Amino acid sequence: MPDLKTEEMVVQMGPQHPATHGVLRLEITTDGEIVRKINPHIGYLHRCFEKHCEELNYHQIIPFVDRCDYLAAMNNEHGYVMAVEKLLDIEIPERVEYIRVIMSELNRIASHLVALGTYGLDIGAITPFLFTFRDREKILDLFEMTSGARLLYNYIWIGGVAFDLPNGFVEKCFEFIDYFLPKLKEYDDLLSYNKIFIKRTAEVAIIPPAVAIEWGITGPNLRASGVDWDLRRDEPYSIYDKFEWDVIVADGRVGVLGDSWSRYYVRVLEMEQSASIVKQALEGLPSDENVKSAVPKKVRPKEGSVFFRSENPRGELGYYIISDGSDIPYRLKMRSPAFCNLSAISDVGEGLLISDLVSLLGSIDIVLGEIDR
Amino acid sequence: MGIIENKFRDNVIITSADKFMNWARLSSLWPITFGIACCAIEMMATAASRYDQDRLGIIPRPSPRQADLMIVAGTVTFKMASRIKRLYEQMPEPKYVIAMGCCATSGGPYWQHGYHVMKGVDQVIPVDVYVPGCPPRPESLLEGFIKLQDKIRRESIATTQAA
């Protein structure tokens, strides 16, 4: 019998693949079912964001900022607008800050709900997706009330917000929080503590804290590795220091620290904290202030540069803006959290089974719009 | 349908067969799950609980070989265009395309400075229905499905398809 030879095979995963969350392509070298090497290819959604920033003025950039991370448009706007405000050095009314925080935190919940639902889909559980989207629609209703849009809002402006909160928003938002908090238990019953789900995710694709820091992983993925770091608490911006809430750090209660299950569960717990922040902000909301009083008629910052980072649902979102004194930024660089989080998979994913790679990729919760920009 | 196309004129048998075939096709449009950008989230919302596209017989399929509808949901870049064409070619006939959102229709907000953005997916594949919006609401997409069903209802197996 002649000697049997085996060799490694290169498999392309994506750009059309249900588990790549968009148009990511992974070039995988496989040895049977085991992944030996991962080579991610990006750029299928390169929409020339930074070129647009060199051509459009500061106000006009806001809609493009929305489209970078389309799951968390409010958070992206919030970060960008605060960077420009830091450059302009203007004070904004307190009511505006409160409205911004309410919107950002609601959007964080919406974004995490999509992450949960689609992660279930990747693993093979279809029902949680329908449940999370049912609740997400209620948040989108609130956004639609305020800004008129469901997904991309262009709501947070430099120096203010586009519209004041409509009549009945506060009551409806309280109603939503009361409705939403008991639903978290439903997700736990459906998905988090589902035996099959735990088998697929616990102790799979472990990212140790040192590796996470090395690759610049931020956000829920970093906290899932046990690193206690959240910009909202450690470098408070806006009015986050006024609220009482906890930074969720994984404790490895199922499986081990830094596995896919921890990354998933940090998001579930974070939604609870976000809901609590929204509740406190609604209670402390100052009344009767003009939300557009600080909106500058012309944005012409002095020459100089600024870096500002904020906590996006996916991690640290940084904006580096260089101004040459005109109404168009000379250069705008975006530090995108999903890009840094994704870059770790070539390291972490080696030696996994192909199906576990799907579990890893889903738990990182990437948005390709932000990776390719 | 290559054997009988353009071989007959309209007659009783053809029109009855047409009605049956068209009914079958329009009642089970299976789109390929293929989200590109922001519009994909609204496409997912259309498939999810509130809008429930299943009631129109629309069930997403993960492979182009099982699909007869492609929803181009998002910005088509030059790097992606060749892949979209290839996916379209892998789909079995008859096949339909919905261009969802302004990006897939005309380049959308990226039409002016987007050096890497294709100004409309119709430059690479034929499009049946355009759904405007940035992103379109789920209601718009459902309306797009209904428009496409109307279009399929008017087809005949005796004539060559426009695509």
Image (cartoon, rainbow, N blue to C red):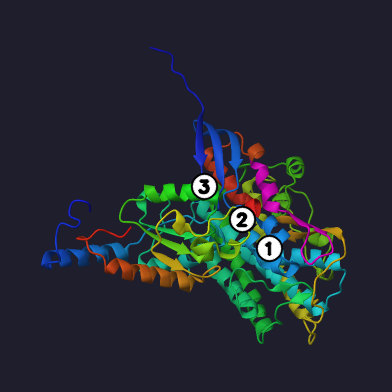
Q: Which mark is residue A15?
A: 3
Q: Answer with mark 3 or mark 2, whichever residue precedes in sequence.
A: 3
Q: Which mark is residue A65?
A: 1
Q: Amino acid at mark 1?
A: Val
Residue position for label 2: A47
Q: Nearer the viewer, mark 1 or mark 2?
A: 2
SS for tag 1? helix
- The chain under label 3 reads A
Q: Answer with mark 1 or mark 2, whichever residue precedes in sequence.
A: 2
Query: Do pointers 1 and 2 mark residues of a single chain?
Result: yes
Q: Of B115 and A117, which appears nearest the observer?
A: B115
Q: Amino acid at mark 2?
A: Arg
Q: Quadrant of the C terminus of chain A?
A: bottom right
Is any atom of residue A19 visible in this view?
A: no
Residue A84 in percent (x, y) is at: 80, 66
SS for tag 3? loop
Question: Quick check: is A121 in the magenta stretch?
Answer: no
